[in-house]
């Protein structure tokens, strides 16, 4: 008990400078950042980019802490360094997750979101590190019926699943498809999330390395697994595939989160 209290006090007061210490690039084997999903860096340039984000978090600490006090919408960002000596260093920070903060010049939130949405990072974070070997086997989409307040999950079939997987990659490459924190994505993203089930003979391989598994965000699974995809009106390739699937009618339409919330408020 006494040892626990000493450790807790040291962390809170940062007596040993642990919080402010950023490992040198030369000492790092791999670096990771987690907000919506893990993003890895094992090349020198990628490691330096993650270290720069860490430095921004420390430099903006007082501004961030003040903003967090005034905002109810926040997110946690974790940075993890796997060191060449086999040890692991990890830090977690709470940051504001609002449109106001996101739109500030050089905000760390914007920097992290931009890094997440680089094509390779998006695909690995969503479909696994071995996404290139994955084969889509099924897909479905959630539809909302405003007249009778019902939701229905519509099966799209394996053929449409294959087309959607190609469309997702095309929209991600063009920057149309983006992962956004929930609070920021509500204005543009559709409420109708797509679920893609895919099979990989090697199973799903998490971006986070096996030797560092110690939380629910990092794991491997065998065979089939799936991913939910949120998309917006900018995702032209996805929308084209959905139109071809002929699933829309007078009652079942695409609806944004904002529109969905307005419908709920009417009731």
Image (cartoon, rainbow, N blue to C red):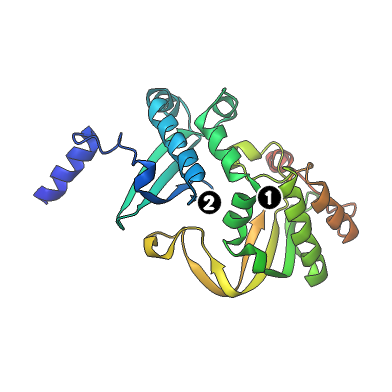
Badge 1: residue crowd in 10 Å (few <14, some 14–19, many ≥20): some
Taking the image as drawn, is residue 155 in sight?
no
Q: Position of residue 263 (x, y in %)?
A: 73, 42
In the image, taking residue 139 as reference, residue 91 lies left or right, namely left
Q: Position of residue 196 (x, y in %)?
A: 69, 63
Tell us which disc is closer to us: 2 or 1: 2
User: Going 54% across and 38% down the picture, which residue do you hit?
Assistant: 112
N-term mark: 2 or 1 = 2
Task: Give the numbered dot on residue 37.
Answer: 2
Residue toward you, 215 or 201 = 201
Badge 2: residue crowd in 10 Å (few <14, some 14–19, many ≥20): many
Query: Does dot 2 land on a helix, a strand or a loop?
Result: loop
Outermost residue, left direction? Answer: 2
Above/below status of 193 relative to 139: above
Task: Give the numbered dot on residue 172.
Answer: none
User: Going 55% across and 31% down the picture, which residue do you hit?
Assistant: 98
User: Going 59% across and 42% down the picture, which residue do you hit?
Assistant: 182
Quadrant, the C terminus: top right
Residue toward you, 99 or 152 = 99
Contact? badges 2 and 1 (CB < 8 Å): no
Above/below status of 26 relative to 107: below
Taking the image as drawn, is residue 3 in sight?
yes
Q: Position of residue 122 (x, y in %)?
A: 62, 51
**Residue 261, quarter of the rendered image:** top right
**Residue 16, quarter of the rendered image:** top left
In the image, taking residue 135 as reference, residue 91 lies left or right, namely left
**Mark 1, residue position:** 230
Q: Position of residue 123 (x, y in %)?
A: 63, 55
């Amino acid at each position: 008990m006494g040892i626990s209290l000493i450790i807790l006090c040291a962390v809170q007061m940062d007596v040993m400078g642990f919080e402010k210490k950023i490992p040198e690039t030369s000492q790092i084997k791999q670096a990771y950042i987690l907000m919506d999903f893990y993003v890895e860096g094992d090349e020198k340039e990628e490691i330096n980019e993650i270290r720069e984000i860490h430095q921004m978090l420390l430099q903006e600490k007082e501004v961030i802490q003040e903003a967090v006090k005034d905002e109810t919408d926040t997110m946690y960002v974790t940075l993890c360094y796997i060191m060449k000596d086999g040890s692991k260093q990890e830090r977690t920070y709470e940051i504001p997750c609002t449109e106001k903060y996101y739109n500030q010049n050089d905000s760390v939130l914007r920097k992290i979101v931009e890094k997440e949405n680089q094509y390779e990072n998006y695909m690995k974070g969503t479909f696994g590190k071995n996404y290139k070997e994955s084969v889509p086997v099924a897909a479905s989409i959630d539809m909302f019926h405003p007249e009778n307040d019902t939701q229905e999950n519509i099966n799209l079939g394996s053929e449409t699943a294959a087309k959607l997987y190609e469309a997702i990659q095309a929209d991600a490459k063009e920057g149309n498809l983006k992962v956004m924190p929930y609070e920021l994505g509500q204005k543009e993203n559709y409420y109708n999330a797509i679920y893609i089930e895919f099979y990989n003979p090697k199973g799903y391989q998490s971006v986070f390395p096996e030797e560092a598994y110690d939380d629910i965000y990092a794991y491997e699974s065998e065979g089939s697994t799936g991913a939910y995809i949120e998309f917006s009106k900018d995702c032209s390739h996805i929308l084209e595939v959905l139109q071809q699937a002929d699933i829309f009618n007078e009652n079942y339409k695409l609806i944004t989160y904002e529109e969905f919330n307005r419908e709920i408020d009417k009731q």
